[in-house]
Image: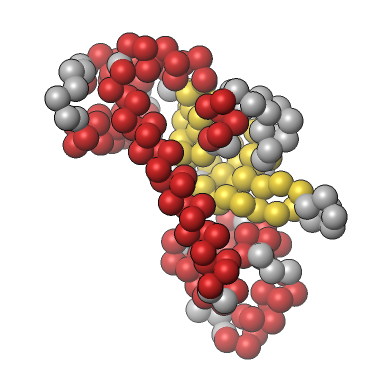
């Protein structure tokens, strides 16, 4: 068992223990299943993991590095970054994954990343053998809902500069991990506008 797998397994068991409400489950069984099921991949260069129209087969956990979720604007042809999943994040087009529908996102992993993964079939088997794991899936769904709500509110109520400062705070290494084009598309501005904002305000 690698360090990344061990840390994730222990974290999941800890979360489940914190949530348990009279639900019977066996930590040792869950640990053995996860250790056997979790796959680990290391990436030395950018790589596309999923394209739009494909069925998402894996739920990824970012043990190290960064995973980007994006789509293309039909009118302009410009890539729009919707997700920047950093270390300790679960990454997947969740609705498509759970409903077994084609993805509406591209998933791209950044160099230096380490991803752990569970296939849909493995997750289904895990839920059948340890039903208590569903509480963690519900938590993941709530997290995605909260993320979308905050992101929508920020785009409507906060300036591009405020969104940029927030991104630097939540993703301290983002400027070393992706290009300015990716950052600007996530913020909803052009690269030129982002450069102008940095000149006017000074780099934080």
Question: What is the count of numbered marks?
Answer: 0
Residue 151, placed above or below residue 42? below
| Residue in front for this viewpoint, 77 or 50 | 77
In which image quadrant can residue 78 be found? Answer: bottom right
In which image quadrant can residue 129 be found? Answer: top left
The residue lying at 69 percent from left, 81 percent from top is: 196
Measured as percent of width and height from the top left, residue 188 is found at: 66, 65
Does residue 103 show up?
yes
The residue lying at 50 percent from left, 72 percent from top is: 165
Residue 187, placed above or below residue 94? below
Does residue 14 show up?
no
Query: Is 74 positioned to the left or the right of 130 in the image?
Result: right
The residue lying at 52 percent from left, 20 percent from top is: 120
The residue lying at 35 percent from left, 26 percent from top is: 134
Measured as percent of width and height from the top left, residue 94 is found at: 53, 35
Residue 52, placed above or below residue 166? above
**Quarter of the image with the N terminus in it:** top left
| Residue in front for this viewpoint, 35 or 58 | 58
Measured as percent of width and height from the top left, residue 12 is found at: 30, 32
In which image quadrant can residue 5 be found? Answer: top left
Residue 27, placed above or below residue 83? above
Measured as percent of width and height from the top left, residue 192 is found at: 75, 74
Q: How is the image coloured?
A: secondary structure
Most extreme residue toward the left is: 22
Query: Is 67 positioned to the left or the right of 150 in the image?
Result: right
């Amino acid at each position: 068992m690698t360090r990344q797998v061990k840390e994730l397994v222990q974290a999941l068991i800890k979360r489940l223990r914190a949530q348990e409400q009279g639900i019977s489950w066996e930590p040792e069984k869950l640990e053995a299943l996860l250790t056997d099921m979790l796959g680990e991949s290391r990436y030395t260069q950018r790589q596309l993991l999923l394209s739009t129209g494909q069925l998402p087969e894996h739920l990824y956990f970012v043990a190290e590095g960064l995973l980007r979720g994006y789509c293309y604007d039909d009118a302009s042809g410009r890539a729009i970054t919707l997700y920047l999943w950093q270390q300790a994040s679960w990454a997947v087009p969740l609705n498509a994954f759970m409903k077994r529908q084609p993805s509406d996102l591209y998933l791209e992993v950044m160099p230096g990343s380490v991803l752990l993964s569970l296939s849909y079939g493995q997750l289904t088997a895990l839920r059948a053998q340890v039903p208590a794991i569903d509480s963690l899936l519900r938590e993941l769904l709530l997290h995605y809902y909260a993320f979308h709500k905050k992101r929508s509110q920020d785009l409507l109520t906060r300036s591009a500069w405020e969104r940029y400062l927030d991104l630097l705070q939540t993703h301290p290494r983002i400027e070393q991990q992706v290009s300015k084009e990716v950052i600007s598309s996530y913020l909803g501005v052009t690269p030129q506008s982002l450069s102008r904002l940095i000149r006017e305000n000074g780099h934080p």
